[in-house]
Image (tube, rainbow, N blue to C red):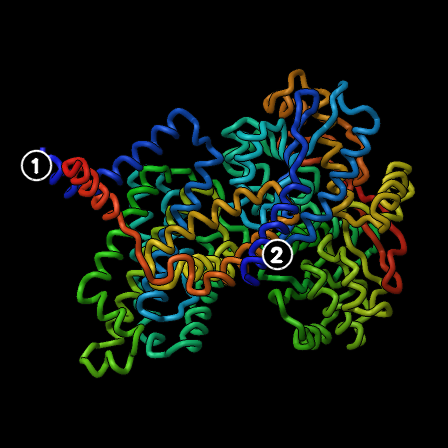
Amino acid sequence: MKKTLLILTAIMVVMAVFASCSQPKSNSDTIKIGVNYELSGGVATYGQSSVEGIELAVEEINKAGGVNGKLIEIVKYDNKSEEAEATTLATRLMTQDKVVAVLGPATSGAFKATIPVATQHKVPVASGSATADDVTVDSNGVKEYAFRICFNDSYQGTGMANYALNNLGLKKAVIIMDSSSDYGKGLAENFKKTFEANGGTVVAQEAYVEGDTDFNAILTSIKGKDFDVIFIPGYYEEAGLIIKQARDQGIDVPILGADGFDSPDLKSLAGAEALNNVYFSNHYSSLDQDPVVQDFIKLFKSKYNKQPDAFNALGYDLAKFVIDGISRAEKLTGEAVKDALAATKNFNGVTGSFSVDENHNPVKALVVIQLKDGEQYSSERLSMD
Amino acid sequence: MNKWTALAQKMSKWIILALTFIIIQLLIQVNIINDYLQATLATICINIILAVSLNLITGFTGQFSLGHAGFMSIGAYTCAIILLRMPTTWGFLAGIFGGALLAAVVGFLVGLPTLRLRGDYLAIATLGMSEIIRILFLNMEITNGAAGLSGIPRFTNWFYLFVFMIGTIIVITNFLKSSHGRACISIREDEIAAEAMGINTTRYKVTAFTIGAFCAGIAGALYAAYFYFVKPSTFGFLKSIDVLVIVVLGGMGSISGSILSAILLALISTILQDFSELRMILYALMLIIIMLFRPQGLMGSKEVSLKIFKNLLSYMPSRKEGQ
């Protein structure tokens, strides 16, 4: 008896959830856009943040009357942070839901896995945060149906090398890189190349792997050397600890990093007093006084009641970028939208204004943020022409 | 007339298989099974190969292994590397058999020392092995490190999926019916008693492990040639757990259980796609409910075989004659 009751309750619960979630039937007055993001699994934070930004942008556009008299409808799926699932869902969005474009996934690997599907079905895919160098272009040329609105990893390495030389006037660098990720390797390589080509010297290059916690051996070995800047291409988990341990050892030279530093956890790992004289490149800064940025922050805060991060901003820009392409497309087909996206000129977004180049990469400025006592103190846009 | 029924009875297994293949192939051709459903179909077939082969190791031989993702990744990378250099059907077949053989060799080499361990110790040793394989792929030049290999041409289709899936099932069920298979089952039941009866337990454990690794290699190769992309993190610890979930849910020691649960889990996962954020919560909830009411797994250790159809065939005419 008890058992039957339990089964019944369980079935009821599941049914109730099904019923409450069932999505409204779509009609032909809407334009469908697919959203294929990591809502659960290893990198769920990236996906969830991006989707928040996307939903904000779509809501804003629909309130203003939609595109060419039609409302935008998003079809959202969770790819569990798995590449195979991302491929399957991209196929589902293109063949079953008949979307005109797919947003996401957030990570380079999963995004790359969906590109062959996009090419086969002639529906463009666009990512806000796939930064690996070979995402939109490889040895076979540009991938026609793949777009992104973020700069790639090597661009940041080059940018930070120029920033150290030209803006900070530093000439002798130590690189402490994350050798377990392509992100770290790519950044280190490009930083070194640009830095040495423009008159700087790399005094030492050390490496660590993801998950390391004690960096004192590395720091002691570089301490005796003559250098005036440290570049850490890696993610905040380890970078936070490196900064803390370096400052504890009395190393007080400027420390540079890239968008992997962008996390509130950096402050909790390193401590506020260690985060002085630290600079990192990012896609966007909330300190930017540009009215586009300030309007976005106000809008975001009113919906989600928190400060937007870079993934929120990139998601917001991505949705607007794709919808802008749809509004300019001659027909509502994937092929026409692809052509319109490729022809984007001077798109003015929160993460900077950009045009799409022949490799489907955006040409945009880097934002360099300076930290003081653990807080973002100043930001400047660094354009590289 | 009787001659024909007798022949049909004899051949019923093969007729059913051929019919299944042809019907699905036709549905694909007229696009009722569209690209999206084909992807689900591929996931099901690959998971069946993985689950059936892990069931041989864990369900029938009683060796708790967490290394299946490691063997799968060997097959996937081998096939990917060969296909990127040789994008032809021969390259694909070479990739499948090369990957499977390599996985089997690694399975044999790893199994020899570790299968002397029992229970939890074996689980940890196989887990360690699969992590070593993953880290090797992460750091090798030819595998392109953490970024993985992309742009692998798609060669896997329903024909190959079907052939390799059915092949795996037939090889493993026949193995289990042989004296080698019975020796494996006796190890699961009581290792000391089996040893006392003169069974070389290590030998049979290694045999089962190697066959399991071979099939996992095939599954990995099919995966790589279907999903365009492989990278080390795909084949982490969680992938092994996923396969183990299928085996335990279907019933340890039931081949048909593994097949049934691989299909069921893929269907549940597909239906739940409409509930983006809630999806994994509902999925886990269903697993808990199923395990609460069927702790022995869906099929326990029972089997359903294609003989059912044979019995059905012999049952129907006889009833007619009786009337």
A175 left or right of B139? right
Viewer-closest of B225 and A360: B225
Q: Secondary structure at mark 2?
A: loop
Disc 1 from disc 2: Cα separation: 60 Å
The quarter of the picture where the C terminus of chain A appears is: top right
- Circle 1/circle 2 CB separation < 8 Å: no
Quarter of the image holding residue B43?
top left
Count how many numbered circles sit on residues in the image: 2
Q: Which residue is mark 1?
A: B3
Q: In the rendering, at what x and y percent does residue A307 appear?
A: 85, 50
**B190 relative to A7, above or below:** below
Q: In the rendering, at what x and y percent does residue A272 appear?
A: 85, 67
B7 left or right of A81? left
The amino acid beneath tag 2 is Gly
Query: In the rendering, which numbered label is found on residue A302?
Result: none
Instruction: Name which residue lies at 34% across and 59% down.
Output: B254
Q: Which residue is mark 2?
A: A42
